Amino acid sequence: MKFSIQRDRLIESVQDVMKAISPRTTIPILTGIKITATSEGVTLTGSDSDVSIESFIPNEEDGNQLVEIFTPGGIVLQAKFFSEIVKKLPMDTIEIEVINQLQTVIRSGKSEFNLNGLDPEEYPHLPQVSEENVIKIPTDILKNLTRQTVFAVSTSETRPILTGVNWKVDSGNLTCIATDSHRLAMRSAAIEYTNDADYNIVIPGKSLNELNKILDDTSEPVEIVITENQILFKAKHLLFFSRLLEGNYPDTSRLIPTESKTDLVINTKEFLQAIDRASLLAREGRNPNVVKLTTLNSGIIEISSNSPEVGNVIEQVQSESIDGEDLKISFSAKYMMDALKALEGFEIRISFTGAMRPFIIHPINDDSILQLILPVRTY
């Protein structure tokens, strides 16, 4: 194998596939990046057997030559060293050549590295996914759907299914739900798809986080193919495979209150900043990171927190409106801030059903996104 390639494009592809490579893998060859050169261009592959990423660099794009293939072939190179080397090479063009057996020479300008490679034939094959049933979502909407839900997945392995995001597809609609059993994030969006199949799957939160880092901010559609135990995301020159989590996701619909006793409408940014300030003194004590919200007269709410060793903070915020019963409620400042950062819109409505019942937050006039938080008992 021998080819020359534009350094910037190679670095970009290496950084993408590195997101699938785990240093803790028990399969030695998966610590490497597989490089394949064909007459069309160069393909890089990284995998940790849960997530696999394939990035393709065509010979030319938009009239610019990116790759010149002299001899097709393949090699697997140690990801850690290869990624560091390509970032530090001096010139805009890099030449990669496999010489006797698996010895690989990497040249750029007056710099030359020799790396020991591994046999590409021993690299595990990527999952075979039949592409009959394709779902299409604009990239920016997919990124938003992920950003507004994935933060609420569980980080504890005691219930592995909760470390993923539940995707439900039916009637041209995709609903994404994440919960760690103390909070819940839900967002839905219309999608295009080529069949009438319904899906109910759970995608690891870690996979979706990595996918979001790689996808560009465009409105170009991402094609999604779902199989029994895999999901494939296809973007321009990029394939992203993830395994799906096994098991049944809990039915979260019954957690969401359908009525409320107190409704609060408030400016998102002002509320977020007040919670942020109150949380500064809420990090110590028996209930760390808990703040209290109290409704007062004339649409004013009081945000407070108290740490016996440090001190206390009280702040009053003017809401747009408060309807219903007076309320005192305590909750996690972190959960509230995460939820507020995920919501888009200048004003939100918070619907409370009592001091010890879950409450929901959503933007005014937008039912496609919802955040739910369980309060904290502080007495």
Image (spheres, rainbow, N blue to C red):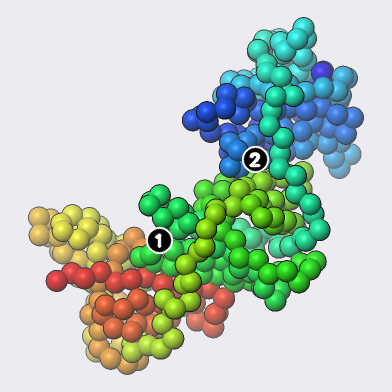
Crowding at mark 2 (Cα within 10 Å: few <14, some 14-19, many 20+): many
User: Is residue 93 among what the camera can see?
Assistant: no
Say which quarter of the image contains residue 116: top right
Image spot of residue 217 (x, y percent): 66, 54
User: Is residue 176 among what the camera can see?
Assistant: yes
The residue indicated by pointer 2 is 52
Image spot of residue 349 (x, y percent): 43, 81
The residue indicated by pointer 1 is 180
The C terminus lies in which quarter of the figure?
A: bottom left
Q: Secondary structure at mark 1?
A: loop
Image spot of residue 105 (x, y percent): 72, 12
Q: Does residue 42 lie above or below 335 as drawn?
A: above
Query: Which is more N-terminal, label 1 or label 2?
Result: 2
Marks 2 and 1: CB-CB under 8 Å?
no
Image spot of residue 310 (x, y percent): 12, 55
For the residue marked with disc 2, what is the amino acid? Ser
Q: Secondary structure at mark 2?
A: strand
| Residue under the point 37% across and 88% down | 260
